[in-house]
Amino acid sequence: MELFIEKIHANAKIPSYAHSGDAGMDLYSIEDVIIKPGEIKLIHTGIKIQLPKNTEAQIRPRSGLALKEGITVLNTPGTIDEGYRGEIGVILINHSKKEFIVEVGSKIAQMVIKPVFRVNVIETQSLSKSTRGEGGFGSTGPK
């Protein structure tokens, strides 16, 4: 499969896999931004993408930023639909108690390309029974 990337800013970096076998490609900032505690910022990547047919791009947090800095992607996973051709932006939130500095070239998130299955939606009067039934929100207990 091929993912086409268009750089639209001089500071843009092409997404890349850090290691062989990684699921996600690193996404990079094209700007210097300060995110204050509790603040939400849209960080620009300076790239546009053209996804393979029947796929989506999921934007996910970087585990190191989450653990060490309290920085995460607000709407995770963020979905980029196959037909979207605008710039990729990443919504970051600072859950820490200190300012976080994003610099040009900082790794801010990861992008995972996933298949998408289209389904026929059928309205019905009832659903089949299952072992789980309607149990949810912790219904299996804490351990």
Image (spheres, helix red, strand yellow):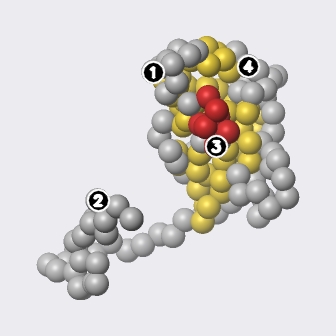
**Structural distance between the alpha carbons of marks 3 and 4:** 18 Å
Q: Residue tagged by mark 3?
A: 63
Q: Residue tagged by mark 4?
A: 103
Helix, strand or loop at mark 3: helix
Disc 3 versus disc 4: nearer the observer: 3
The numbered mark at residue 55 is none
Identify which residue is drawn at 58% across, 50% down: 58
Q: Residue tagged by mark 1?
A: 38
* Residue type for callout 2: Phe
**Structural distance between the alpha carbons of marks 2 and 4:** 39 Å
Q: Which of the two labelled residues, at mark 3 and mark 4, occupies the earlier sequence position?
A: 3
**Structural distance between the alpha carbons of marks 3 and 2:** 25 Å
Q: Which of the two labelled residues, at mark 1 and mark 4, occupies the earlier sequence position?
A: 1
* Residue type for callout 3: Ser
The numbered mark at residue 137 is 2
Crowd rating for badge 2 (residues with CA inside 10 Å; few <14, some 14–19, many 20+): few
**Structural distance between the alpha carbons of marks 1 and 4:** 19 Å
* Residue type for callout 4: Glu
Q: Quadrant of residue 60?
A: top right
Crowd rating for badge 4 (residues with CA inside 10 Å; few <14, some 14–19, many 20+): some
In the rendered structure, the answer to whether residue 130 lies left or right of residue 113 reads: left
